[in-house]
Image (tube, rainbow, N blue to C red):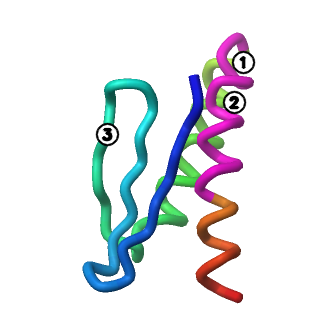
Amino acid sequence: MTTEVTYDSTARAFTMTKGSWTNTYPISDIQKWIEFYRRQQERFPAYAAIYDEDVRALEKLADSISS
């Protein structure tokens, strides 16, 4: 399942969508969520590949806003 992350610069928030699940967070929390999904990979190695897509999508957004 594909993870999509979009950024709303006006609201200073990002929305993460995966399948039918979606949620919006303040952009100031993006590093917290990257770290959360990395910990999930460590805690649940059988599902590490699933969380990898989340980490990559969040890191891509973080890199694009810091550039």
Q: At 71% from the left edge and 88% from the top edge, which residue is drawn?
A: 67
Give the secondary structure at mark 3. Answer: strand
What residue range appears in magenta? 46-58
The x, y position of residue 6, in whole percent, is 46, 60
Vertical placement of residue 59 versus 40, above or below: below
Task: Give me the residue at 45% from left, 32% from top.
Answer: 18
Is label 2 in a helix, a strand or a loop? helix
Q: Which sits earlier in the primary sequence, circle 3 or circle 1?
A: 3
The three-letter code of the residue at mark 1 reads Pro
Of tags 3 and 1, the one toward the viewer is 3
Vertical comparison of 39 with 12: above or below? above
The secondary element bearing badge 1 is classed as: helix
Please give the residue where the numbered disc 3 appears in the rendered image: 22
Q: Position of residue 56 (x, y in %)?
A: 70, 49
Residue hosting label 1: 45
Which image quarter is the N terminus in? top right
Residue nearest the viewer, comparing 17 with 43: 17
Residue 34 drawn at (x, y percent): 58, 54
Distance in Å between CA atoms under marks 3 and 1: 24 Å
Reply yes or no: does residue 40 show up in magenta.
Answer: no
Q: In terms of image quadrants, where is residue 62?
A: bottom right
Numbered badge on residue 42:
2
